[in-house]
C-alpha cells in the first residue's frame, strides 16, 4: 500500500478547513482575507469572492477524498489523516489571522 491516499487526505482536510472561514464570512456578507486581495492574504476580498473561493476549496477537498484512494470515514487511519490536515491548517490560520484581525498574539 502506498501512502499517497493518506497524504491526499491530509491535504483534503487542510483544504476543507480553509473553506470554512471563507464560506462563513461570505455567507455573512463580510469581507475577509483571501489570496486574491491586495496584498494577498492580508487585504480584504468581497463576500462574493470569499464564497467562490470557499466553494472552490470544498470542491478540491471533495475531489481529494472521493477520487484518491478509497476513503472510508470509519477507518481510523483515514479519519486521522483528514483530521490532521484540518488541525494543522486550523492552527496555522488561527495564528496567521489572529495577528491581522486582533486575535491572540503569538505565544
Image (cartoon, helix red, strand yellow):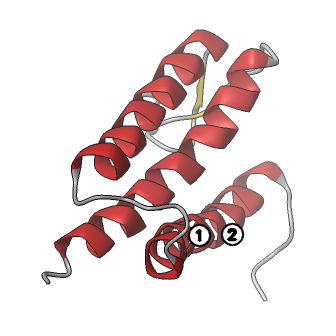
- The answer to whether residue 12 is above or below residue 9 is above
User: What residue appears at the point 45 percent right and 75 percent down from the top-left corner?
Assistant: 81
- Residue 94, image x, y percentages: 71, 64
| Residue linked to disc 2 | 95
Verify CB contact (< 8 Å) between mark 2 and mark 1: yes
Please tell me whether mark 2 sits on a helix, a strand or a loop. Answer: helix
- The answer to whether residue 66 is above or below residue 13 is above
Is 49 displayed left or right of 103 in the figure? left
89 and 37: which is toward the camera: 89
- Residue 102, image x, y percentages: 85, 56
Cα–Cα span, label 2 and label 1: 5 Å
- Residue 84, image x, y percentages: 53, 76
Where, by quadrant of the figure, is residue 69 drawn? bottom left
Q: Quadrant of the C terminus?
A: bottom right
User: What residue appears at the point 36 percent right and 51 percent down from the top-left corner?
Assistant: 65
- The answer to whether residue 45 is above or below residue 82 is above
40 and 11: which is toward the camera: 11
User: What residue appears at the point 18 percent right and 72 percent down from the top-left corner?
Assistant: 4
Neighbourhood count class around disc 1 (C-alpha, 10 Å): few under 14, some 14–19, many 20 upward: few
| Residue linked to disc 1 | 92
Please tell me whether mark 1 sits on a helix, a strand or a loop. Answer: helix
78 and 39: which is toward the camera: 78
Is 102 displayed left or right of 26 in the figure? right
Amino acid at each position: 500500500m502506498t501512502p499517497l491516499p493518506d497524504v491526499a487526505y491530509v491535504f483534503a482536510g487542510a483544504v476543507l478547513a480553509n473553506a470554512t472561514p471563507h464560506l462563513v464570512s461570505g455567507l455573512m456578507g463580510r469581507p475577509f482575507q483571501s489570496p486574491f486581495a491586495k496584498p494577498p492574504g492580508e487585504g480584504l476580498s468581497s463576500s462574493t469572492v470569499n464564497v467562490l473561493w470557499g466553494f472552490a476549496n470544498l470542491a478540491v477537498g471533495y475531489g481529494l477524498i472521493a477520487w484518491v484512494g478509497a476513503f472510508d470515514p470509519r477507518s481510523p487511519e483515514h479519519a486521522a489523516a483528514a483530521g490532521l490536515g484540518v488541525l494543522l491548517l486550523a492552527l496555522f490560520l488561527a495564528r496567521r489571522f489572529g495577528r491581522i484581525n486582533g486575535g491572540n498574539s503569538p505565544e
